[in-house]
Amino acid sequence: MSQTTVAAPQPLSRLQIWLIAMRPRAYPAAIAPVLIGSALAYADGKFNVLAALIALVCAMLLQTASNFINDIYDFRKGADNDERLGAKKVLTTGLLDEQTLIRATILVMVTAFVIGLGLVWIGGWVILAIGLLSMLFAFAYTGGPFPLAYNALGDVTVIAFFGVAATSGTYYAHALEFSQASLMLGMATGFLASNILGVNNLRDIPTDAKAGKRTLAISLGETGARWLYYAQTALAFLMPVLVFLLSYKWTVLLALLALPLAIKECMNVAVRNGAELNASLAGTARTLMVFGLLTTIGLVLAKP
């Protein structure tokens, strides 16, 4: 009688481990606002290719640092444990030790600051202020004496920094001024990025509550958290319409082609629970990326 042997799982490479820590699936929240801010500057005849490249690199570095910091403090406070329904993180699983991740965080932050000096040279003290505040809030999101994500302020922070500051700040680096359109489109990306966090927090209500992490989803309850998702989706898709009404060409409305995808995700969020929401997490990130790409294309085509 033959016996079937089960092959032992192959150990992860260093690259695979660092990719888990970096969480590249979250990068749409960093990439979309920079693309939109740069495309809006192009539509307004104020595009600067160097500013676009530096802003994109810095945004991705800050997203990475934010993910590292989030891992460190959630691990320390017990929010990441074996009961968590999302993807297991590097500290919880022992793939990396805390000191290694701290050193990596410092390295990424310093790199972002040094590269960002090129953007400061282009945009001046306003860009410096936005950059320093972004770095501060990347830490304050889960670290410090009053961690924002643990006090129901994570969603507001995401809208402010992954939306308004990232989009309008990118636009400022090109144009050396803010605009109504950059603020509106920044709110759009912020609302969709906040939906990514919202799905994550909706899924983690039981484990976050045990860890003492008071997210907005816990404050609102499951029904309220779902309605917040629907409302933010609606507001996000309203913004391109308002930008069109500011006398931009009809091509900015190409962003609305992502609406069926967004509606599908709203319907999924309405019926999914627990680990099922991992699929909605990926779908919400995909919605943001598609919205960002369509908005970018629409703005490029809107150039007179």
Image: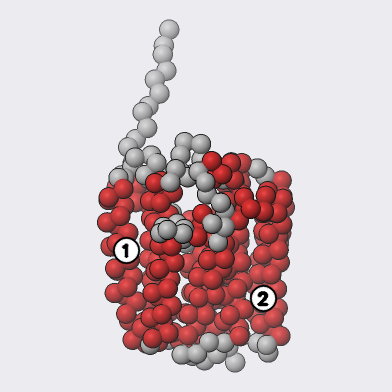
- Which element is circle 1 on? helix
Residue 108 tag number: 1
Residue placed farthest to the top in the image?
1
Q: Position of residue 145 (x, y in %)?
A: 42, 58
In the depicted structure, whether residue 92 falls above or below residue 199: above
At 33% from the left and 86% from the top, the residue drawn is 121
Q: Is residue 117 left or right of residue 161?
A: left
Q: Nearer the viewer, residue 144 or 75?
A: 144
Q: Position of residue 230 (x, y in %)?
A: 70, 60
Write down the quadrant of residue 160 in the picture: bottom right
Gap between marks 1 and 2 measured at Cα: 33 Å
- Which element is circle 2 on? helix
Q: Is residue 183 left or right of residue 59?
A: right
Residue 31 tag number: none
Q: Residues within 10 Å of mark 1 (few under 14, many from 20)?
A: many
Q: Quadrant of the N terminus?
A: top left
The residue that mark 2 highlights is 239
Identify residue type, mark 2: Met
At 65% from the left and 72% from the top, the residue drawn is 255
Q: Nearer the viewer, residue 203 or 215?
A: 215
Identify residue type, mark 1: Val
At 48% from the left and 56% from the top, the residue drawn is 25
In the depicted structure, whether residue 223 falls above or below residue 263: above
